Amino acid sequence: MNHFEYRKGELFAEEVPVRKLAEEYGTPLYVYSASTIRRHFKAFDSAFDGLAHMTCFSVKANSNIGVLRLMAEMGGGVDIVSGGELYRALKAGVPGEKIVYSGVGKKAHEIREALEADILMFNVESMPELERINDIALRMGKVARVSFRINPDVDPKTHPYISTGMKKNKFGLDIEHSRIAYALAQELPGIEPIGIDCHIGSQLTTIEPFLEALQKILKFYKELQAMGMDIRYLDLGGGLGITYDQEEPPHPEVFGKALSDAIKDLPLTLILEPGRVIAGNMGILVTEAQYLKSTPSKNFVIVDAAMNDLVRPALYQSFHGIGEVVQHGRAPQMYDVVGPICESSDFLARDRELPEIRQGELLAVFSAGAYGFTMASNYNSRPRTAELIVDGDKVTVARRRETYEDLVALEL
Ligand SMILES: *Cc1c(COP(=O)(O)O)cnc(C)c1O
């Protein structure tokens, strides 16, 4: 459920007509719904109410400080994957003790910054990373809390680019190496191993791969207990999918119950790192039709949003719903919805049936709140869009539109 709905043929973001937002702030434009963020966060978080747990929003899904602040206000933590995301999270008021740090390539300065912020833990993905964290922690007179990211070799049955827990992926350590890693961690004076972690992929639409991974992790957890390790945190990552098109992912409640049942008697605090399931359907990308163009094989609607604004269709061939901002009730036609960028991969939809569209009309691209703006670039020297947060009838510019001066500001 989200708070974008048609009222008398006109799309509203909460209490505000999207047409008005486009008129005032221009297009292309990202519009987020604060009530939807709150609703999704609560639905997810409360699915684990019976357990000691912490919901750490995955910052890479949507890193706008305004969005992160909404998470922080609800008591959420964050999962970060870079020093830049740490900086944003701290700016948004997320306390260090609610931050976990994942990623295969943490640089020395990023580790230092995270130790300065006294984050809850590093999710360590290799032995050399462990050694680097130990060295830096010792030099700073600190002890770094860590978990190891286990690669459980489970097929999440999602797009290959967002599968992360299979043997061939770069992520985590297999169980064999994890044994050695924990044994070493126990010896290192700058390291305190406190958790186990895994994240098997994104946009999962069934629970089975999560449960399969969990069984493997729990078996390993028992081994660690037998080794005398004091493991208090179980981080199961993110990955729960959403409906873009026809997908029917499990409701968070069902997901929560399945996981909770498996671990409820263990002395563990569960950490979850949802991104897409909270942010995906809280945002739309609004765009204006510039030209209609028909060729012998296609009808193109050329819009002012492009792959630099929303790369998911080009990168993952992913589906995004598209609808008129003001419905005119015209007969449907087949369209390719494409942007102005000089690449044939620059499309938002292909062979899509939409009501006949005319020049100057507005379209909304749905489910654009996660991996939308965060993956945007300046390709073709296109200034990045503004981001708005609508809360009831209140509109906040969470990020202003970039200008041409912004485009060249860093070039000396
Ligand atoms: C991307 C990522 C997530 C979030 O994944 P979603 O599919 O958006 O829930 C969580 N944890 C880690 C380590 C990630 O890389």
Image: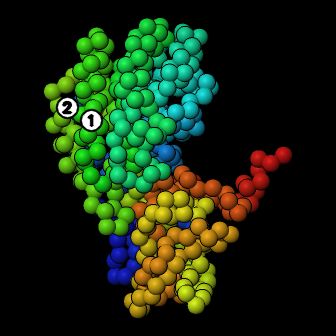
* Foreground pick, 305 / 14: 305
The residue under label 2 is: 263
Query: Is ligand 1 within 8 Å of the beta carbon of the residue shown at mark 1?
Result: no
**In the visual, does 114 lie left or right of 262?**
right
For mark 2, give the secondary structure. Answer: helix
Q: Residue shown at 24%/46% (left/top)?
A: 208
- Tell me the quarter of the picture where residue 323 sits: bottom left
Q: Position of residue 136 (x, y in %)?
A: 57, 16
Give above or below for 386 relative to 191: below
Give above or below for 147 relative to 367: above
**In the visual, does 209 lie left or right of 377?**
left
The N terminus, quarter of image: bottom left
Q: Position of residue 97 (x, y in %)?
A: 41, 26
Image color mode = rainbow
Q: Can see residue 391? A: no
Residue type of the residue flagged with mark 2: Ile
* Foreground pick, 295 / 243: 295
Residue type of the residue flagged with mark 1: Leu
Distance from the alpha carbon under mark 1 to that under mark 2:
9 Å
- Crowdedness of circle 1 by 10 Å Cα count: few (<14), some, many (20+)? many
Give above or below for 33 relative to 225: below
Q: Position of residue 320 (x, y in %)?
A: 43, 67
Q: Which mark is residue 297?
A: none
Q: Residue shown at 54%/85% (left/top)?
A: 298
- Tell me the quarter of the picture where residue 407 sits: bottom right
